[in-house]
Image (cartoon, rainbow, N blue to C red):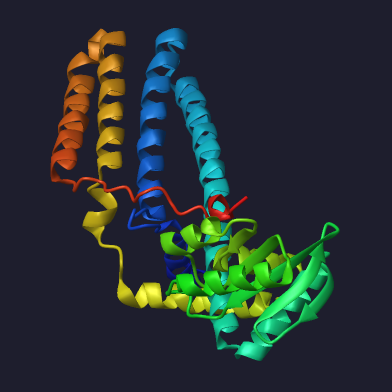
Amino acid sequence: MTFLKQVPDKITEWNCCLDENNRHQSVIGWLLDAVLLFMTVFTISYLWFVYKTKIPVISVLLAASLSALSGYVYFRQRQRQLKKKYQEKWKKAAYEYRIKNLFKLNHKQFKWTLAKALLRIGIEDIKVENKHITAACKNEKVMIGFYHVPYTSFVPAHEVFKLSRLMLRYGYKNGYFFTTSDFDDACRQAARDTPGVTIRLINGNILVDIMDTAGIFDDKQAVDKYLTDKIKDYKLQGKQSLKQLLIKQKNAKTYIIYGFLYLGTAFVFPSYFIYFFLIALFFILLGILVYIASPSEKHDPKEYDIKNHILQ
């Protein structure tokens, strides 16, 4: 009974992992796909075996075995996909949790946490000043600026200009600018427009990766709890409706493919032509209706790749 009570929660967890950028998927949809696959493989293989062996009992056993094998392969593939999706969801939750905690630090705490992370990844001769940090990276002296703002905001361009002026004043040619948020075009332009200096912009995503590599975070259990709370919120919000899960262009294509498979089977076995033709017609019409009823899938613009925006 305990296992049965946990099933709805596990399904919600899996659906939450699959729900990404409003592209709704569900393990229930996977189960329906598996049933269709099993029925199709069993029907076609049974007719083939009975046609070849003329022994219905053996044909049923062989068809069932082949269907079970195809189902096993299907579920193993889905299991790997689900594991990958969960890891992606956990990583995203970890980023959100860590960046929020970094923002909770005051200016001094953030500055020293950043210095500690840089020291652990091999940056040498670190000296922490009030507004910046100086250090040595690969035997070259560098100046490091930082701006501690909410991760939903952009860094003001004049902060990057301040760092460039300090670098020119003290003779630094290479610099880094770290932030818990992100940089807009004005910041990138400011980093490029100062002659004689090179400033690499490090936004919140890369900052979290650096600190994670440096072992700053010891929060696996906290992130697990944070993700569990997000899954509970997902369940309360009831984000997925039956229409969102079933009426999709992807499902329409699947139905049409099955329809053509049954249509091909009808020509292979002429004596059962009318039965397979009606099944094929049903799936093809179902696919067309679902395609018409489904909203067009709007793909998000190419995701922002933070590593493409580190100025070389």
Horizontal and vertical percent position of residue 196: 64, 56
Q: Which of 90 and 99 is in front in this view?
A: 99
Q: Position of residue 55 (x, y in %)?
A: 45, 15
Q: Mark yes or no: residue 108 visible.
A: yes
Residue 57 vertical position relative to residue 187 in the rendered view, above or below: above
Numbered marks: total: 0
Quarter-wise, where is residue 86 in the image? bottom right
Kindly indicate the quadrant of the structure image that contains residue 259.
top left
For the residue pair 191 and 45, the one nearer the viewer reads as 191
Report the residue at 44% width, 71% height from top.
154
- When the figure is inspected, residue 178 is found, relative to residue 104, above or below; the finding is above
Query: Percent x, y for residue 22?
Result: 33, 58
- Residue 235 at what x, y percent from top left? 37, 73
Q: Residue at x 26, y 10 (%)?
A: 267
Furthest-front residue in this view: 169
Give the vertical position of 230 relative to 107 (above or below).
above
- Is 42 situated left or right of 126 in this image? left
Q: Can residue 121 be seen in this view?
A: no
Q: Is residue 262 above or below residue 27?
A: above
**Residue at horizontal 52%, vertical 75%?**
159
**Viewer-proximal residue among 39 and 246:** 246
